[in-house]
Image (tube, grey):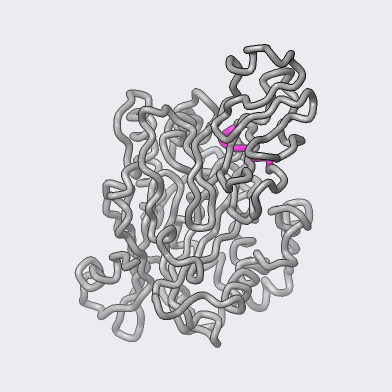
Amino acid sequence: MLKPEENERLTRVGPGTPMGRLLRRYWIPAVLSEELSERDCAPVRVPLLGEKLVAFRDTEGKIGLLEDACPHRRAPMFFGRNEECGLRCVYHGWKFDVAGTCTDMPSEPPDSLFKAKVTIPAYPTWEGGGMIWTYLGPPELMPPPPDYELCRAPQTHRFVSKTFEDCNWLQALEGGIDTAHSSFAHNLDINDKAFLRSRDTHPRLEVDRTDYGYTYAGIRALDTGEQYVRAYHYVMPAMQIRGRVSGRKGGIEKIPTINGHLWIPIDDYTCNVYNFMYSYDPAIPLTKEYVLGLEIAYGRGPDDFVPGTYRLKKSAANDYLIDRDLQTRQSYTGIVGINTQDYALQEGMGPIVDRSKERLGTSDRAIIAARQLLLEATYAAENGQAVRGCDPATYRKVRAVDLTIPLLAHWREALKDELVAKF
């Protein structure tokens, strides 16, 4: 369990908070590339880490991320005109480029020098892996842009989506790195003996600290004389990388993929979840049918969202459309959609769960380790010290694995080649 003050330290993300200061040391996703799909397209609101920002793609294709308030009279820049390499406030016509420089001030006299004295807060951006990333921290501490294998995978081999989640970012993250819950919450057919995670519901967890966070393995003994290993990575501050069993059911899983999430705080009480997958076989690109099948299985299909948003139709307001009959006959949750099951449980804890009331067991080692790393990092960030996961060299070669190996084999040795990125 955590002390109340530690829980506060890990969950509050606004400017000046310990966790807010830490998160601002990393490049984090601001929007999907598809949200700014064309040059001079409409700007997009970007609530991020308790700040109100606006993003736009200019005439040259450059991405701007500005404070969503004109420095003149604080009018919202979201309503601005995106034109000729700048975003123009429609209140008095002041125009700003992607760097926050005022390039036009038509409400002032032509000979006025005031324009040269006015800027709008702007943050650096980088586009890669189907996402637009930003860095909100001190310029002198800005690390190199992200270099995950996801970002190096060809566009034909990757897919990224986004989902709004109505809870604090940490309980969403902790749900993702908890491997034991998949034996229950994600058991879609409790009578399916082929479901590997149902054949050993108390996996042995091993966690190895690294310069980027940790590698952790959930190890399940099988009655076949083998062991089933899910060797994942937690990359600080908010990324999980996991493998996926290929060829397991009827064609939907015949493409060998790496999957994962990034949990990015909107504010203290909500977050955006960036979901990614990529084929790790250079000869096998993703197909639309494969991606659609998985997104529907996860509860993120085209019909699962409120139109025009990244919010799911299934929510606390309708109890995630739980089917009690389905729960009795077939699945533990009675909720359709793998990630929808996660959201029901994580959002159901409340906006910020009180971790001082928890009772953790041996299957919670990965969660405990993540909390320890994050707490340590908040103190390091306060002192201007280096923090884990900032340097791309520490994580660029990692890859996750979801495989069976001989019962007496040691996973670190047996899977050492599989755990290395190839792109």
- Quadrant of the image occupied by residue 70: top right
> What x and y, as percent, mark residue 365?
36, 52
Q: Is residue 203 above or below residue 82?
A: below
Query: Which is more toward the observer, 188 or 96?
Result: 96
6 magenta-colored: no
Q: Which residues are magenta?
A: 44-50
Q: Residue at point 72% right, 45% down?
A: 42
Q: Quadrant of the N terminus?
A: top left
> Quick one: which residue is furthest to the front in this view?
111
Q: Is residue 45 above or below residue 335?
A: above
Q: Residue at point 63% right, 39% down?
A: 85
Query: Which is more toward the observer, 104 or 170?
Result: 104
> What x and y, as percent, mark residue 217?
33, 62
Q: Is residue 233 above or below residue 237?
A: below
Q: Is residue 186 visible?
A: yes
Q: Is residue 318 left or right of residue 280?
A: right
Q: Residue at point 67% right, 12% down?
A: 112
> What x and y, as percent, mark residue 336?
67, 69
Q: Is residue 126 left or right of residue 58?
A: left
> What x and y, as percent, mark residue 369?
35, 46
47 magenta-colored: yes
Main secondary structure along the magenta-highlighted residues = strand
Q: Quadrant of the C terminus?
A: bottom left
Query: Which is more toward the observer, 407 or 307?
Result: 307
Q: Residue at point 58% right, 38% down?
A: 64
